Amino acid sequence: MDPSPLILDGGLATELEASGFQLQGDPLWSARLLHTNPQAIKDVHYRFLQSGSDVITTATYQATIEGFVKYLGLRTEEAQQMMMSGVQLAKETVREFMSHSPESEDRREPLVAGSVGPYGAFLHDGSEYTGAYEDKMTLEELKDWHRPQIQCLVKAGADLVAMETIPGLKEAEALVEVLKEFPEIKAWLSFSCKDIHNISSGRSFSEAVQVACRSTQLVAVGVNCCPAPLVKPLLESAKSHKKADLSWVVYPNSGERWDPKTGWITEKQMSFAKLSLDWKEQGALWIGGCCRVGPADITALKQQLHV
């Protein structure tokens, strides 16, 4: 019998914006609320748990020690605590959900994935979708950048680390290398992709999967923050390079794309919930949504996959 996929959550920032928080243009994005309104983050985590998420992701995608020092005026030690609070809030929410919610009956204990975004997310200049900064940085510089964030997430007790929306191979290599310094932690590695064959930097997704296969700590490799119709051909293009003991992780955006000048543009396409049956058939065991995906979409996804 095939194992059932684990259902991830959706867009944390999308839900926060729907609740009235202004995040666009903020260099800390949703991570600012770790400082200003942690309860709002817990409320969103709770809604995704109610909708059926088996994994919730921390509000740390755009959180960095340097960013907290620069934009919140915190000392390094305070910034580290702020980073760790992302995991603590998520774990508190899981405990509350499992203790008090009727939806928790017969549910497996949800996992907390500590989110690690690309260096470009800190730069706040759109380069997280191109990886252009990789050419100017060494592998060691990228490792040094990511190490403090991963260290905090691991120390705070994340069940695994979600290294996500990674645009390029060098940064992926750096993350896989840093992960070795924390041998007790598992992780997934997820890439942003520009078309049906290539990650955002222009290198092939097949090459990206080969980088992931060098790690013994990854539970999954895959794609996120891309249009849902790209997922099936991307997985197909790289399936011969994936190790048998490595799953696919898949969490694309809803049927909308972001235009820096005009905002979100709705495009007609099949819902990602319906497309998810293909991904499950291709062996994806971690399936959810990214930008513009809310709790109702996760409920629809869970129903579609019959899990």
Image (cartoon, rainbow, N blue to C red):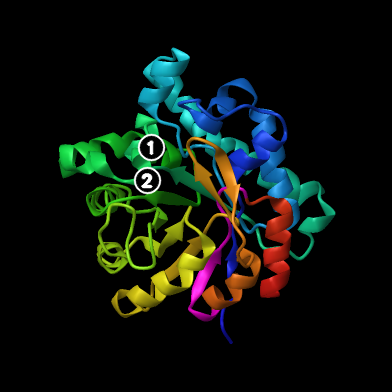
**Residue at mark 2:** 129
Whether residue 143 can be seen here: no
Decide if residue 214 is on the left or right side of residue 166.
Answer: left
> Residue 168 location, x and y as percent?
28, 51
Q: In this view, does 141 lie above or below 82?
A: below
Residue 126: give its label. Answer: 1
> Residue 278 location, x and y as percent?
55, 77
The amino acid beneath tag 2 is Tyr
> Residue 176 location, x and y as percent?
28, 53
Number of numbered discs visible in the structure rendering: 2
Boundaries of the magenta span? 281-292
Q: Is residue 288 magenta?
A: yes
> Which residue is rendered at x = 45% and y = 19% of the image?
78
- Please say if the residues under marks 2 and 1 sit with CB atoms less than 8 Å apart: yes
Decide if residue 155 is on the left or right side of residue 86.
Answer: left
Write down the quadrant of residue 27 in the picture: top left
